[in-house]
Image (spheres, rainbow, N blue to C red):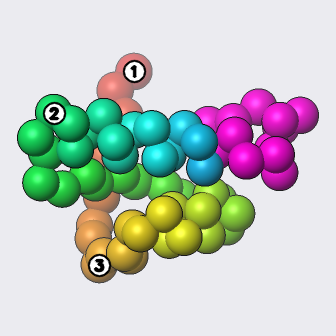
Amino acid sequence: MVDAGARGHGVGKVLTDKAIGLAADAGARTVDLTSRASREAANRLYERAGFQRRESTVHRVTLD
């Protein structure tokens, strides 16, 4: 996540591209990520980086 003050300056793109590059260099065949639907700008960034939306269900249990 990019600090609010740094958003809109390409930091997210650089970080995303670097992460994808590191994964490729390590021999990964795919990269998956999760993001809340409400994070619209982040989701646009991921789609511009080549990620495709997938139908998925995430389950979580919160323990006290």
Q: Is residue 3 above or below residue 64?
A: below
Which label was assigned to residue 55? 3
Residue 4 forms part of the magenta stretch:
yes
Indicate the amino acid at tag 3. Answer: Glu
The answer to whether one can see residue 51 in this image is yes
Return the x and y of residue 53 as percentages of the image width and height: 38, 76
- Gap between marks 3 and 2, in whole Å? 27 Å
> Residue at (34%, 26%) from the top-left corner?
63
Say which label, 3 or 2, has the lower sequence index.
2
> Residue at (50%, 45%) from the top-left corner?
16
Q: Secondary structure at mark 3?
A: loop
> Residue at (48%, 63%) from the top-left corner?
49
Q: Label 2 belongs to which residue?
A: 26
Q: Label 1 belongs to which residue?
A: 64
Q: Quadrant of the image for the C terminus?
A: top left
Q: Secondary structure at mark 1?
A: loop
Q: Nearer the viewer, mark 1 or mark 3?
A: 3
Given residues 54 and 16, the one toward you in this image is 16
